[in-house]
Image: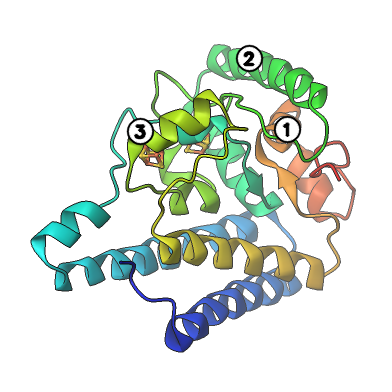
Amino acid sequence: MQPPIDRESNKQFMGLVDFAQTLTSSGLQRERTLERSQKIFRKAALITDNRIKDVLTQLDTMSEEEREFMRPKCSDGCSHCCYQWVRSTATEVFAVSEYIRANWSPEQVGDLLVRCQSYREEFQRHPAGSMFSLACPILDGNLCPVYDVRPFICRGCNSMDVQKCAEGREDPNSGVAIPIIMPVLMSAGAVRQGIQMGLEAVGYRPTELVFALALETALTSADVADRFFSGEDVFANDVIPV
Ligand code: SF4
Ligand code: SF4
């Protein structure tokens, strides 16, 4: 049993897409700056987290047995899902790169850039569309050190069965079905999609990025965000391969 995806919840997903698209396009039409992008991200993240909380609150209406079955088994130190590559927008990438710039030492950033470079080499070895496990370069001791500003897909990732997540990480081609609470993932995906549509509506292309690749680009120099918001295609090498 799942919290239902009925006409009402579909309306809510569409509402999230519309909200994030308008937030992004109207914000950037007023001011094409990193600061504006950060405000957009913070607001969109808050809305996403609140929507996810609302979905999970619906579990309270279930029997104790159903609730235990449905409860997301996600916990600190559980990171099998961080071995899938993450689809993200430039807005999300800048939220993480700026957080890292503000909070990490130059040595930590340097080490991260080395891991990002290895990630890129490994990522490019796999044919487009293939399934593979590759640790997010940010992952540190099975924890996410940028948790507060993590991308939307990471916010929506969930599972009712951690063993299935482990099996999926071990062999991504095994076809194992990970039982997820779909409205949680869909809510986060709706916000990400709305931001992407908002960016495209004001002329930024392409905005669908491989998070770890784009993060490396964003961290290589302090003016990447300014160049992006001036219209330069700074993430040309970080787009999702087709
Ligand atoms: S989605 Fe799976 S691997 Fe990720 S935190 Fe939840 S249970 Fe752990
Ligand atoms: S950003 Fe954080 S939560 Fe997302 S894949 Fe990387 S380590 Fe995991």
Q: Give the label, 1 or 3, closer to the camera.
A: 3
Query: Does 213 sit above or below residue 87?
Result: above
According to the image, label 1 marks what residue? 213
Task: Indicate the amino acid at tag 3.
Answer: Gln
Distance between mark 1 and mark 2 Cα atoms: 15 Å
Horizontally, is 209 left or right of 3 in the view? Answer: right
Residue at x-position 55% and y-position 30%: 83
Q: Give the label, 1 or 2, closer to the camera.
A: 1
**Residue reaching furthest to the left:** 64
* Rendered image: mark on residue 163: 3
Q: Secondary structure at mark 2?
A: helix
Q: Is residue 185 visible?
A: yes
Q: Residues within 10 Å of mark 2 (few under 14, many from 20)?
A: some
Residue at x-position 65% and y-position 65%: 193
Where's residue 44, x and y in %? Answer: 51, 64
Distance between mark 2 and mark 3 Cα atoms: 34 Å
Query: Does 202 sit above or below residue 96?
Result: below
According to the image, label 2 marks what residue? 110
Task: Indicate the amino acid at tag 1.
Answer: Leu
